[in-house]
Image (cartoon, helix red, strand yellow):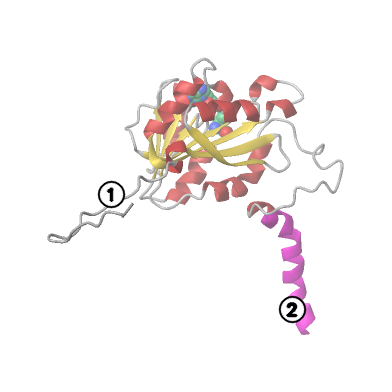
Amino acid sequence: MSRTTAILPGFLLSVAFLPSLLWADGAQSTRVTDPQQYAKASSGGYAYRQQADYILTELDLRPGDVVVDIGAGDGWWAEKMAAAVGPEGMVHAAEIDQRLVDRMKQRFANLPQVKPYLCKPNSLELPEDSCDLAFLSQTYHHLNKQTRIEYLRHLRKVLKPTGRLVVVENYSELLASGKDHGTQLSTLLAEAEQAGWIAVRCQLIRDSSAYIAIFVQKDLFAKPAPAAKKPPPDGQKTEKPSN
Ligand SMILES: C[S@@+](CC[C@H](N)C(=O)[O-])C[C@H]1O[C@@H](n2cnc3c(N)ncnc32)[C@H](O)[C@@H]1O
């Protein structure tokens, strides 16, 4: 076999996967090369799940991390995140629907790092400073609009100071119908800001009408207080500046 014949299949394979690699590293150009490129994006539904690898890359979970998956549903994301945090980590799969909790308990009977449980609509009832990540996929629009900002403040308490909030949500402006099955990005950003979160990344999810928004706590941006000046060693005079 010639050298070219040996290299060609690998080259073709890498070209075929190039677009998703570019997307995954966040370096994809925003230039519009095809006027139809956004019109082709699916509207609503679960199309964003096709980009699960990209979303998981953005989550950057590490073994041992503790995640709370809020509105875990059937546990589709909880299972994927459990693989990333490993047996030493934990995924609290929080749901307000007891039937879904029961189904998840069956589904995850052999995956002990996933803990399905019944939460309250306005409280996760988890200890303070206990989680590295709060994940809401298609759940934000389900939260009570009157108390959502309070809920986002509650999440700051449940998360560690370095914990992140990640929201995957349909961009309601892009939904042809059923706009209440999503949230305007501007609404989420404004509410999160009021609750003390700062967006560090927002991205439309390829071929879908959903976005991913990642937040960290505003406190992280506070400058550390200047270190107190050490007193001079014993016996040494402090020189006053001459006027
Ligand atoms: C559209 S499903 C999303 C399921 C899953 N996260 C996904 O992306 O496939 C929304 C889920 O959120 C749950 N839910 C609604 N309000 C909630 C709340 N306040 N706390 C926790 N779960 C909630 C619902 O019971 C439902 O299962």
Q: According to the image, label 1 marks what residue?
A: 228
Q: Is mark 1 on a helix, strand or loop?
A: loop
Question: Which residue is located at x 72 percent, y 26 percent?
Answer: 173
- Vertical arrangement, residue 70 with respect to residue 28, above or below: above
Compute the Cα span from label 2 to label 1.
66 Å
Amino acid type, label 1: Ala
Ligand 1 closer than 8 Å to the CB at disc 1?
A: no
Magenta residues span: 1-22
Depicted 233 relative to depicted 2: above or below: above
Residue at 71%, 43% in the rendered image: 206
Can residue 96 be seen? no
Q: Mark 2 points at which residue?
A: 6
**Secondary structure type for disc 2:** helix
Image quarter of the N terminus: bottom right
Q: Callout 2: few (<14), some (14-19), or many (20+) C-alpha neighbours within 10 Å?
A: few
Residue 31: x and y in percent read 79, 48
Is 184 on the left or on the right of 150, as rendered?
A: right
Q: Residue furthest top?
A: 146
- Give me the disc on residue 242: none
From the viewer's side, name the closer residue of 158 and 56: 158
Left or right position of 154 against 25:
left
Q: Where is residue 177 in the image (x, y as percent from the top left)?
A: 74, 21
Observer-side mark, 2 or 1, equals 1
Asked if residue 142 can be seen in this view, the reply is yes
Q: Residue 110's spot in the image, x, y percent?
A: 40, 44
Q: Residue furthest right?
A: 35
